[in-house]
Amino acid sequence: MSKINVGIADTTFARVDMGAMAIDEIENVTSRMRLIRYTVPGMKDLPVACKILFDQHNCEMCIALGMPGAAEIDKICAHEASQGIIMCQLMTGKHIIECFVHEDEAETPEELIKVCDNRAREHAQNVIKLLFDKEWLEKNAGKGLRQGYPDAGPIKS
Amino acid sequence: MSKINVGIADTTFARVDMGAMAIDEIENVTSRMRLIRYTVPGMKDLPVACKILFDQHNCEMCIALGMPGAAEIDKICAHEASQGIIMCQLMTGKHIIECFVHEDEAETPEELIKVCDNRAREHAQNVIKLLFDKEWLEKNAGKGLRQGYPDAGPIKS
Amino acid sequence: MSKINVGIADTTFARVDMGAMAIDEIENVTSRMRLIRYTVPGMKDLPVACKILFDQHNCEMCIALGMPGAAEIDKICAHEASQGIIMCQLMTGKHIIECFVHEDEAETPEELIKVCDNRAREHAQNVIKLLFDKEWLEKNAGKGLRQGYPDAGPIKS
Amino acid sequence: MSKINVGIADTTFARVDMGAMAIDEIENVTSRMRLIRYTVPGMKDLPVACKILFDQHNCEMCIALGMPGAAEIDKICAHEASQGIIMCQLMTGKHIIECFVHEDEAETPEELIKVCDNRAREHAQNVIKLLFDKEWLEKNAGKGLRQGYPDAGPIKS
Amino acid sequence: MSKINVGIADTTFARVDMGAMAIDEIENVTSRMRLIRYTVPGMKDLPVACKILFDQHNCEMCIALGMPGAAEIDKICAHEASQGIIMCQLMTGKHIIECFVHEDEAETPEELIKVCDNRAREHAQNVIKLLFDKEWLEKNAGKGLRQGYPDAGPIKS
């Protein structure tokens, strides 16, 4: 059975190697994907990196990993990158799972690395579900799932 | 008479299963639609989910249900998702009824669930009207209709 | 002489029937247009409504009427709708005259209705000018014209 | 030698006739352009006005002149117009020189008119340079040029 | 071996000649590129400048250099330019390395020039890596690289 190409787009700007974490998670779980990694300088280079992964590397899906800094300008960059990632998906009709960890999300380096690891792995799981197990997602609709932190869970009256 | 395909795009991030509410409403009212549900991880995955529902599942219309959290970053995600949903509609020439409930819209869990249920059902009704009864919408132009809360009603001098 | 199709896109969310006001203004002035009204639930449905009016109803121009509420989220919705309306124009190469009245623009219901009536009619006049009398617009370039309120007029040194 | 069509898009909303200023500047300097003026109601009509000038009037370049008011909503309109102007350029591969003067840029009417006149003329000069003298622009790269106010000049250590 | 065309898009608005710095860096390192410089008036002209460099000058990659001023309006211009630069990349499937230095990033003129020089050269290096040494980027994924300031480095637990 031929493998499905999946793109891993990440950055040298990020301060944690989330791309490696996502790759590790996928390779531990399945051998049905061929992972194609594409590292770019910063978050705003991710949309076209995914476009290239779709168009030139025949990817069926991508995961885009980035780590915005704590400054206001970094928030704006992340916003621009997200808009581009959504547009790229609309142009190609293919999913890009965005996995961003903001540098100010955690209080300590240990906690931040933990958030990165959890989020990268849980979003890698989302890629796997979208490709091979859409029913799992449907069964979990409205369940308050989170990536990087414990699930919020469904609201109970 | 052949059925009309309608897409139900929702998320595992949401803490209330609004997709089920919308489906229930439609199935109670009409058997003229074939509902195709597509659950994705988060709000920002909804635009391409609808694109896929239009392009690969032959849908005539979609409803996109999401539940932004209370944090500032969630507001930005909702904004990005909305922009993508509008762009998707322009690319396909088909309607996507956006049904978002912000987690901080209500004071209590009971009230929040109630808002979700009302809004999902009332927007499901909007899908039905847009497909089968555009005249009803025209008759209600400028009437201050709301989804999830009581109608504001027309302004009276 | 064949009539020119003009789309009137409006919403059930609005609390004043501005669509009827725009239609009344146009029908009082000219019989050269065939008006096609398309009422949608909310502002964010207006861009695709205009796309459909252009593509499926052969419209040469549209007017899009909406009434954002006073809350912050309504301002964001109006912004998203405006971006979509501009994109729709670029995709079709045709004008959409946007006629939005914010619910908090006026102090009293009477005044708000008055602003709606004036703006809808004056923007309906803009549609007429763009279709039949571009010279009038050119003669009024830089004249500080307003819709809904008295003209600001040209700045005088 | 055949003339180059250049579009002058401006508005009736503006309170100073900047279109006339730009036209005057160009006609004083060169007879190699055929100027095609297109006046629209407001700033948000400028992107499609330029699209029409490119597509239907065979323009090689446009200048888009507008005058946002001092209110917050006017700033948002200007932002939306600018996004549309950039998108129009990307769709056509042609330049639109945006010449906006914010009504609150100056303290007195005299000063505001002066800023408008300077900016319209200096941006008209930019159109001329982009069409006929790209080398001049290259020689002035990083020189801190401004339009409407004195040049900031290069930063000196 | 034929050279690869690379576009250098910069502005007359910038107060430091970052285009020259980027060109100097590239020419010192490699003779495999043909550099095509295109100077435009301001940041918002950069997206279409790159589009023209791709479409008419056969560039494989671009670097876009700009220098937003310190005022709020300049931040918005930079945001609009960035959105356009991302869209241009998605339309062409080619990278544009954005190199913006905000005028208020540094305290003294000397420091600002230094930041410009470092950032222009380090982003020029990113162009070289993307074209000829993608493996270097992959090896540096998650390493907290910065341009213009010392690298932040990877987060250590």
Image (cartoon, coloured by chain):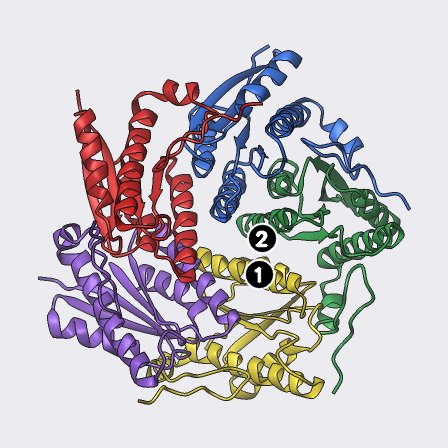
Chain colours: A blue, B green, C yellow, D purple, E red
Q: Secondary structure at mark 2?
A: helix
Q: Please name whichever residue, C4 or D26, is drawn nearer the observer in this view of the structure.
A: D26
Chain hosting mark 1: C
User: Is there a contact, CB below 8 Å, between mark 2 and mark 1?
Assistant: yes
Residue B90, given in percent of the width and then of the height, sits at: 54, 52
Residue E60 visible somewhere in the drawing: no
Label ID, residue C81: 1
Residue identifier under label 2: B86
Q: Examine the rendering and report whether any part of residue A8 can be seen.
A: yes
Side of B62 where A152 appears, left or right:
right
Q: Residue at x 79, y 39 (%)?
A: A142
- Residue B136, quarter of the rendered image: bottom right
Spatial CA span between label 2 and label 1: 8 Å
View extreme (left): residue: D1
Residue E98 location, quadrant? top left
Q: Amino acid at mark 2?
A: Ile
